[in-house]
Image (cartoon, rainbow, N blue to C red):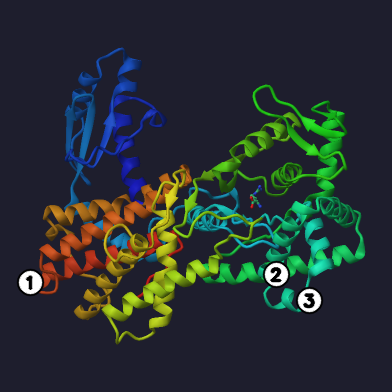
Amino acid sequence: MNLNTKVKNQIIKTISECMKIGERNIYLEKPPENIDADIAFPCFFLAKTRGKNPVEVAKDIAFKIEPEGYIKKVEASGPYVNFLFDWTVLGNELLRTVLKQKEKYGSSALGKGKTVVIDYSSPNIAKPLTVGHLRSTIIGHSLYRIFKFLGYRVIGDNHLGDWGTQFGKLIYAYKKWGSEEKLRTMPIQHLLELYVRFHKEAETNPEIEEFGRMEFKKLEEGDRENLKLWKKFKEFSIKEFNKIYTRLGVEFDYMLGESEYLDGSKKIISRALKLGVAKKSKGAVIIEFEDMPPLLIQKSDEATLYQTRDLATLEYRMRKFKPEKILYVVGSEQSLHFKQVFRAAEMLGIKHTGVHVNFGLMSLPEGKMSTRKGRVVFLEDLLDKAVDMAKKIIEEKNPCLKGKTRIAERVGIGAVKYNDLSRDRVKDIKFDWRNALCFEGNTGPYLQYTYVRASSILRKSGIKQFKSFDAGLLKSEREVSLLRKIFLFPEIVENSANDYKPHYIANYAYELASSFNDFYESVPVLKAEKDLKISRLALTECIKIVLRNALWLLGIEVMERM
Ligand code: ARG
């Protein structure tokens, strides 16, 4: 059990014993910033069950509980009981815990025995990854790490869009205009070219749409040549995607594309018809709802759709993994899709735990994208640009740095990731190059830089192991505020998992980093007298550990120098 939970449980136990109320009915809150307290107990519920005034109840509790151990003061404030920790006692235990647990500090066994499936990235093959897929990849991967950190079994599944009528079009276009050579050397560009050409051609010659449909039908019926082409498209696309995933440091446990669920989809359709959940409509099969547009699950030419395959996937995941939750990290524009799919599943008797973890649009200064018209921003170019900019800045600031190329890569990629993860995912983002790569303010480079700064102080001190420090000497407001922040970390991680919001961790890391910089600029560390120096260095080491853990959860790498 982490220290944060341990301390809270102790307070809960004390209140429970003193007021004869069940521990499960006690909720503690974090008091607002301007209140000098570490934890508060709101008395409303307890007062209600006793038919008393919450202000009186708070006074009563504050009177009855003797401060001891970690607790320095118990005080009633209106309907709240405020607890103030004794940081000279708790501080030492906290620093010892962090120094001992290192990369495990903040983790817990909360999720033991439970499974979470995360569906993220999930691009469409034969097309370039879009910025939307980048967001899904970054947010999904962070959630993957957060849940793992909390002890869950986590299954990361990249639900590739590898089936659908567009493959008929592509096969048609490839047979007509394709080049084996180009497919091998620049697969995505070439496939995109073919796709664009198909749509351009179809404007003047609409009958080729029908040819595309025919090719897809052949593919669905298992035609050897078409299947071979499709496999090639898929294989080359995955190779390209993997380049980006490697660069982003992202991994998956499975890459079960839509094509894995063709049989499952057929079964869903016949079951839906048999149960009377779906009905035939002009040759197609639809599921109707009272409060939403109908969901098409089979086209009139008997082809299945994205949503049919999602229904089959949902059932498969529930059966195979028995997950506590399935998180679909997909843009908000698919909200209706998921509402329909989840409701349809319930109507089919599929008990599920799917959650749409949605996110807003990210717009690039480069302008709007359209795959059909071939206007796309290749993610690789975006990452290259970020890395280039990072390289320039490093060149200016620290031209003699060793391993510049590797560090620029980390800074550039970290900047792109942090830019995304530091904002509430549901909001739209305007990507701003200068802001993202700035070394000041709430940015990735600033956090990496703060980490480097802490490392450099520790290096200069020459101390490798901290044994005899005394947190009791860390008495200034700035120091206590840092201890408080470190103590809070496990709680922040838990909250961010509960709401599927990595930005809680990002903003926490930013606050920790700025408080640390503030501390370092206002009190002497290396020049302090011996005991104080060691204690301040121990604090610095702990901040470094927590910062590294927080950034790790966001998928951002740190370095000792930059
Ligand atoms: N391939 C889809 C797209 O690019 C996203 C898939 C998301 N996952 C899912 N199970 N529907 O829009």
Toward the top, the furthest residue is 51
Q: Amino acid at mark 2?
A: His
Q: CA distance from mark 3 to mark 1?
A: 72 Å
Q: Amino acid at mark 1?
A: Glu
Q: Residue at x 76, y 42 (%)?
A: 308
Image side of residue 212 versus residue 394, left or right: right
Circle on res. 180: 3
Image side of residue 241 versus residue 451, left or right: right
Residue closer to the observer: 43 or 348: 348
**Residue under circle 1?**
529
User: Does ligand 1 reach within 8 Å of label 1's beta carbon?
Assistant: no
The image quarter containing residue 534 is bottom left
On screen, 529 above or below 120? below
Going from N to C along the chain, the mark reached first, 3 or 2, is 3
As helix, strand or loop, the secondary structure at mark 2 comes to helix
Q: CA distance from mark 3 to mark 2?
A: 10 Å
Disc 2 packing (10 Å; few <14; some 14–19; many ≥20): many
As helix, strand or loop, the secondary structure at mark 3 comes to helix
